[in-house]
Amino acid sequence: MHTLNLLVGTSKGLVVYPFHNQKPLTPSVHFKGFPVSMIYVDDRTNTWWAGLSHRHWGEKLHFSLDQGNTWHQAGLPSYRNYEYRPGKAATLKKIWVMQQAGHDKPGCLWLGTEPGGLFYSEDNGKTFHLNESLWNHPSRLDDQQWFGTGKDFPFIHSILIDPRNSDHVYIAVSCAGVFETTDGGKTWTPRNKGLMAAYLPNQSPEVGHDPHQMLMCQSQPDVIWQQNHCGIFRSTDGGKNWLDIGGKNGWPFYGFALAVDNHNPDVAWVIPAESDESRIPANLQLQVCKTVDGGKTWQSKSEGLVQSFAFDLVLRHAFVKQNTFLAFGTTNGNLYYSTDESEIWQSLNQNLAPINSLSIAMS
Amino acid sequence: MLMPKVKFTSALKRFFPSLSETKLEAGTVRTVLAKLEENYPGISSYIVDDAGQLRQHVNIFLRGELIKDRIHLSDEVKPNDEVLIFQALSGG
């Protein structure tokens, strides 16, 4: 019998909920009291990865080969001997995202970080090296193209591998935008045509955009979705062109969280927030929006969610989907799930610490 | 032979359970941390960042006072000194 494990990275620890027959069992707690900022499951080996952001002791990366029974400290990406700007040493601020590099590249992992470095490991995380091609991209050295917004520095939060060709990779940077490589990271090309940067005098720059989260339909990898600071966008040609698919009446528009269907390229979900100024649910109603027509129309799918006095925000990595299972967690420590894609939400916990990241592991 | 003593905040024991007061060769704060890393692999990443500078929310006291050079860790550590490695009362 398969067990689905929902891994919940919170600011005070990792909480793991096993599900049997779509019913949650007693959870386990790992790294109790520590800020777990990133969670990732490498489905090739069922290795669980946890990024910890210690306020005192810095970023750390841990992994488990036995579904959380034991954890080991991995190597760390290092900016030693690299400069953020001429004369200014770069240092690791945060590990934002991890992605296995493809089934034909065992032991290889990508890692996206703040202040904007993309790292690669060829030894299952014992060592990481900086992708110098991206680090030395002329746009990265330009304060008007790569810059921090909510954070002091730009950060890489999304990494997508083309399932047809693992040398074909997309990353999304906040703020800079989307970049594509077709040669395993030797060269990178901006892919931001059609996006909007409403916060810049030139609102359509080649680089300078703020994608919040980017995902790919695994069965049709030319279909890529992004929740952006300036709306919701979708590409059907592998990122060459982006189309604004935000709600026609302005809702949904802003937000962080995104989930996509890996079989139907027209289906996706977002969890909107009111605006970048307030970052609260519109009308204080916690809502999930779904499209089944590639973003032409959106419907609220919010049965079971709090529809008054809700101040919950869902961060970019706190919404997951696997087959018919959907789950999301909020900065107020609320955790919701739906097991049958009916989007009838059930509360799993209302008293967690702020939720940073979710991931799903099968065992 | 007289050697400087290094003491730690108990918070570090959560990550290095065998951590205890340690005597190491005199030199500078940097060389003391390098020796400490040999005894407790991985511990230096908790104390300094990847540029080798003392982390913002970590303090090192030498002869009862904060070290002066948080960047290069060049403060001299003498054989009869006591080095205290604490987390700062900040950072959450």
Image (cartoon, grey):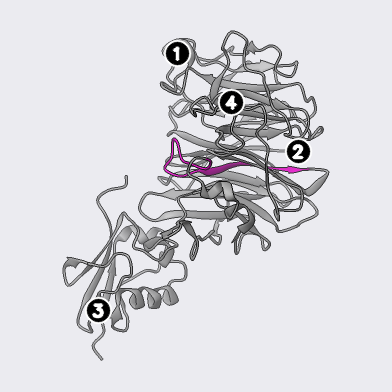
Task: Pick whichever, B23 or A223, lies toward us.
Answer: A223
Q: What crowding class fits label 4: few (fewer than 14 Cα within 10 Å), some (14-19), or many (20 or more)?
A: many
Mark 2 or mark 1: name the one nearer the start of the chain.
Answer: 2
Task: Pick whichever, B18 or A270, lies toward us.
Answer: A270
Please name the residue that numbered disc 2 is placed on.
A1
Q: On what subunit does the disc labeled 2 rest?
A: A
| Cα separation between marks 2 and 3 | 60 Å
Count of marks overlaid on the render: 4
Up/down of A187 relative to A176, above or below: below
> Does label 1 lie on the same chain as label 4?
yes
Secondary structure of residue under mark 3: strand
Task: Pick whichever, A67 or A305, lies toward us.
Answer: A305
> Does label 4 lie on the same chain as label 3?
no
Please name the residue that numbered disc 4 is placed on.
A196
Secondary structure of residue under mark 1: helix
| Cα separation between marks 2 and 1 | 40 Å
Q: Which range of residues does the magenta coloring cover? A: A145-162
| 2 vs 3, front mark | 3
For badge 1, the amino acid type reads Leu
| 3 vs 4, front mark | 4
For badge 2, the amino acid type reads Met
Mark 4 or mark 1: name the one nearer the start of the chain.
Answer: 4
> Does label 1 lie on the same chain as label 3?
no
Is B20 left, or right, of A208 in this rendering? left
Q: Which mark is residue A284?
A: 1
Mark 2–mark 4 CB contact (< 8 Å): no
Report the residue at 55% width, 56% height from top: A71
Q: Position of residue B58 (x, y in %)?
A: 31, 58
Q: Which mark is residue B77?
A: 3
In magenta stretch: residue A353: no
Q: Position of residue A197 (x, y in %)?
A: 55, 28
